Image (tube, coloured by chain):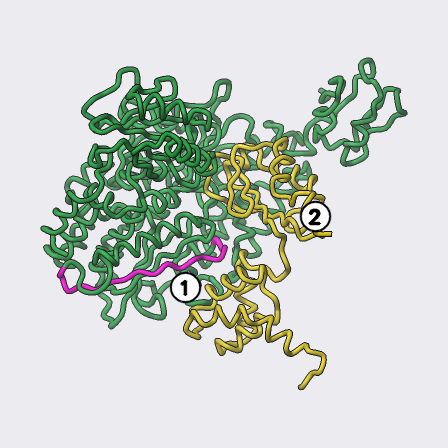
Chain colours: A yellow, B green
Amino acid sequence: MACMCGHEQGLQKYLEPLEQILSNYAREERYLVPILQDVQEAYGYLPAEVLREVARCLNISFSKVYGVATFYSQFHLQPRGRNVIKVCTGTACHVRGGGEVLEALQKELGIKSGETTPDLEFTLETVACIGACGLAPVIMINDDVHGRIGPQDVQAILSSYRRPAETEVAAV
Amino acid sequence: MTAVRLNELKGSGPQPATDGTGKPRIIVGMGTCGIAAGARKILQAIMQEVESRRLDVLVTQTGCIGMCQNEPLLDVQLPGGPRITYGNVAVKDVPRIIASHVMGGRVVEDLAIAQFAEGKLEVENVPRYDELDFYRKQHRIALANCGHIDPESIDEYIAAGGYTACTKALTEMTPEEVIAEVKLAGLRGRGGAGFPTGLKWELTRRTPSDKKYIICNADEGDPGAFMDRSILEGDPHRVIEGMIIGGYAIGADEGYIYIRAEYPLAIKRLEMALKQARERGFLGTDICGSGFSFDLHIKKGAGAFVCGEETALMASIEGKRGMPRPKPPFPSVSGLWGKPTNINNVETFANVAEVIRGGAEQFRSIGTEGSTGTKVFALTGKIANTGLVEVPMGMSLKEVIYEIGGGLPSGAELKAVQIGGPSGGCIPAELLDLPIDYESLQEVGAMMGSGGMVVMDQSTCMVDVARFFLRFTQQESCGKCTPCREGTKRMLEILDRICSAQGREGDLELLEELGQHIIDTSLCQLGGSAPNPVLSTLRYFRDEYEAHIRDKRCPADVCAGMSAPYEIDTESCIGCGLCARLCPVGAVSGERRKPHRIDGDTCISCGACAEKCPVHAIAQGA
């Protein structure tokens, strides 16, 4: 259906990164997981319109794509924060007080595990094991691992990821 | 590439731990643990120092040497001198080490923790690695190069004897001979159940097919385990070499390394290693002039623990939901895209080259009759020396924990050792003389698993630990079969109520019955081993469960809602009101500047008030 509001054009532009991604792969089902990984990298999450387009291009059903997207914990159907905090809840971290670190983070950010702050700055989640057990308790913010931390360190660590106040003012 | 050319290559690369370059070498430990402990800042400081002093030195990196508690680590080696390791290095120590050791030739003794044994000149007052308690009893095969060589340099791997086994297998042995050697060596799968590797290869070799695959399972998802990550980060070529030999043995021309996306550094190093191996002709067509062609791909996991199960892993590579399917048919008959497929774990592949290079007899001489070779463990929890250790099979738990691990920190008393992660079990202190081999561990209700070894003391509640592992497997249950999906959920509910003082008589028997049913009827080993942590703690720590149910008491004082409420000492309370504001359940009342009180029925004993009270007037009641 021809739409005069520019939506079609907007969608086309929106799907441009996807076109780029798909050009790197043969259009076969076996590449679904890596394609979704790239989509999430480009869009920050897996938007429904993009998933529909992936299904169309790989010639598989949308439900199959949705099934895979919801099966793996790495994939997200909702937008995520600029910084993603992963709190390790592995055995070693559990034994060494990882739970208290998580509590401190929840308190400091005012969100629960699995949620994103309203300003889309931080997403807080737990992971089973980061694999740095020798440094327990451990959290990972984006690609940085912070080890041997306690609840008292949380504020300082978070502030190093917040945008500096000046730039915010400047942006306004 | 022939063996002769390989020997020539050996001379051309930088020699690890010797003075091959003629320049002083500074080597930084850049595994994930090292980086987390601040290795990048150390590296920056070194670069700055080197630049400002215009030094002619070689700054390089290495993987994890296993001493996590001493990270960040930094090695210095002068031409002709021994390689000295400095531990717990801070940025401020860097100028001192460079000025004194690199420029002045004087070892900074207060920071040095060890020296490599290979050096000709030894420094007094610095122990050799093989004199350190942590290393003396270790026997390193899979970890032999980790922390020694630069994992991003194929030359260093070759100089350390790498790719000779692959050349030998491909040019001097038939696939059948390779399989016979691996069988004779008694190598068993290091990923969990301990299935004989040679037999697995033979089954896949025997299935006739135009196409076969070999897969490396690097989906190391067990909480508390990080040996596969360390091997891949510290010595990726060793795993690749093992896979080439395995591919040759079973007749596969293509392989996959299925690795967790949570291991970005390991993925990066693998990608580099694959590229280098292709450039040198160890991957591609007609490898070593043998006519055998083989190549490898990396497949990143997307976060599903069940994908460590081999049929689920293959479904995931095929682009589907990673759910297991019934066996038979086994992957050796019908695996990836219906073709015969062989799957081994990272550590298993890391042992293959040694079997071929040194021969089966030499490999057999390590370990026990039924469990040959070594096993890598991630030693963590309440222990003095946390880190990666590789020990001969058959060593007792006591030796690992007290002689290598240095025992527990002062004051702590060992209560249990958890082995094998969510599939394993808790071994009580009285069984510490148990030799570590596949069968002995199975007998006591634990499992080799992937090799997590978590030491627990009196402050750990065994019911809480069992609940922790079960919650993990419950969340990771893929939902395909009923016993695992529903059964683990019901078990978790029972544990939840036991931990919150709601336990009932008969709960323990119900847990045992349910657990046994889940083990017997689950589709795959995720469900088939999920009840192990619960059943093993029930077996050895039943009294703790009973205390939770009958006395509504948590002996380790871990389970919230079971410990005594907090009380305010009205004499010393200044009525600041901080506790009332902090209390998450509103149990504190009182007027400003007058003594406050805590409602014992509402208090959940979280201790938030006591922690912040400016006059320390709050304490837990008797």
Q: Residue most toward the bottom?
A: A1
**Residue at x 15% of width, y 54% of height:** B169
Identify the mark at residue B165; answer none if there is no mark: none
**Residue at x 33% of width, y 39% of height:** B60
Is B170 in the magenta? no
- Residue B360 in view, yes or no: no
Which residue, given by chain and number where applicable, does mark 2 sit on?
A: A168
Which residue, given by chain and number where applicable, does mark 1 sit on?
A: B317
Per the rendered image, the range of residues in magenta is B289-305
Where residue B158 appears, as percent x and y from the top left, is 21, 46
Q: Do the CB atoms of the residues marked 1 and 2 lie less than 8 Å apart?
A: no
Q: Does dot 1 land on a helix, a strand or a loop?
A: helix
Horizontal side of residue B397 vs B285, given as left or right: right
Q: Residue most toward the right?
A: B591
Q: Is residue B69 above or below residue B224?
A: above
Q: Badge 2: few (under 14), some or many (20 or more) residues near its Cα, within 10 Å?
A: few
**Which amino acid does the dot numbered 2 rest on?**
Glu
Do discs 1 and 2 belong to a common subunit?
Answer: no
